[in-house]
Amino acid sequence: MSVRANLHLDERAYEYIYAYAHGKGIPLGAAVSEIVLNRAENAPEEETVLAPPEFRQTEKGYWVRAKRENGLVITPELVKELSEDEFEY
């Protein structure tokens, strides 16, 4: 799977990734992917961070935003109720 993204890089980081990609004859995106995945695969377990603290992983392995204490919980019932409301355009 491939994802298109815009990255804002420090000038030194850009120069490094550009030289790395040019030296290997690969696109910048492929170079960024290689470096990030290499770092993630070789990082000690305690250094690996999979998601920001506001996210959690469900029993089925999906990453979801953690419930906020004051936040509204979106339930299937709420979605059905709101979808049945009439809206004026």
Image (cartoon, grey):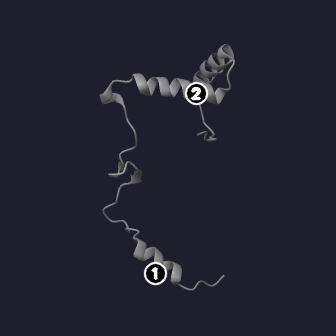
Mark number for residue 29? Answer: none
- Residue 54 percent coordinates (x, y): 37, 50
Q: Which residue is nearer to you in this view: 44 or 72?
A: 44
Mark number for residue 81? Answer: 1
Occupied quadrant, residue 68: bottom left
On the rendered structure, is 14 left or right of 58? Answer: right
What type is the residue that disc 1 sits on? Glu
Disc 1: CA contacts within 10 A as few (<14), some (14-19) or many (>=20): few
On the rendered structure, is 81 left or right of 73? Answer: right
Occupied quadrant, residue 70: bottom left
The quadrant in which the C terminus is found is bottom right
Marks 1,2: beta carbons within 8 A: no
The tag earlier along the polypeptide, 1 or 2, is 2
Residue matched to label 2:
32
Q: Is residue 67 shown above or below 50?
A: below
The quadrant in which the N terminus is found is top right
Disc 2: CA contacts within 10 A as few (<14), some (14-19) or many (>=20): some
Residue found at x 36% / y 65%: 71
Residue found at x 62% / y 27%: 30
- Residue 49 percent coordinates (x, y): 37, 35
The number of numbered badges drawn on the structure is 2
